[in-house]
Amino acid sequence: MTPQPFGTRLRRAMDERGPLCVGIDPHAALLSAWGLDDDIQGLESFTRTVVEALAGTVAVFKPQSAFFERFGSRGVAVLERAVADLRAEGALVVMDAKRGDIGSTMAAYAETYLRPGAPLFSDALTVSPYLGYGSLKPAVDLARESGTGLFVLALTSNPEGAEVQRAVREDGRTLGATMLAHLAEENAGQSPMGSFGAVVGATLGDLSSFDLDVNGPLLAPGIGAQGATPADLPAVFGAAVRNVVPNVSRAVLKEGPDAAGLRSAAERYADEVRAAVG
């Protein structure tokens, strides 16, 4: 049976649960704020609390792989369990690993996250295209086969990103715009939207010079601690705003370890995004 595409599943999840992605970023300062030690026990307690509080109501989760990898194999085991448990509750998982390489190495990264049955199998993966968009082909091909998706770094919220993403090619187009054009080609003809999205920072202000209508999802970090608000989304994303997947991490996670606080914060942001995007 052909798997249902990620874009279809994402649209349904956001319509049913609300247009929100919650990041799972267990960095040392956050563990300390929760009264936890910066060790494998603290990591596991933090992760279990987030999963148990939010997995049944939030549409999308974005675990940051690095914060688990730093604990070695035991940390990765915590991540594996979290991914499986989130998906078992009907949530979608975007693995934030920002992988990017060429040939067989890129294929191996794709197998790690996008092959059904793999320990870290996720619904989508963040990838870096700056070895050339064509280097992502193994991941694109496997995503199509497995019904998963990709989020390609296009216009990121970090100030340093402009050095690369807004560099101008010989044809007069920026690299960021080039990546968006590639994604529009990948998603052509797909409904309700394609499975190949871009990472576009919600803090970037007026992006009207870029064509963000790639007929795919736009993962938008920057809401909450980085200063953007749900009300900013229409001005940043324009006509593409309905396909925005706003990511909130610290602004929700700081309400833990109280489960009710986590749920209340997630519900509030989902409601604010829904009101802003219409």
Image: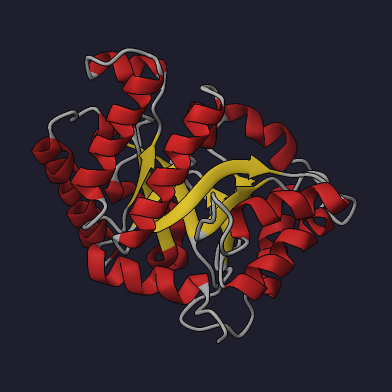
In this rendering, position of residue 241 left or right of residue 57? right
Q: Report which quarter residue 45 is drawn in.
A: top left
Residue at 39% from the left image edge and 72% from the top image edge? 11
Relative depth, front residue between 188 and 212: 188
In front here: 244 or 32? 32
Q: Residue 181, percent across and down?
A: 70, 65
Which residue is at the far left? 260
Q: Position of residue 156 (x, y in %)?
A: 57, 41
- Say if 260 sits above or below 83 in the image: above
- Residue lying at 60% horizontally and 53% vertically, measured from the top left: 113
Q: Is residue 84 above or below residue 65?
A: below
Left or right of 2 in this view: 260: left
- Provide residue 246's location: percent of width, then percent of height: 38, 51
Q: Is residue 175 above or below residue 8?
A: above
Q: Residue furthest right?
A: 170
In this rendering, the count of numbered labels is 0
Residue 258 is at least partly visible in this image: yes
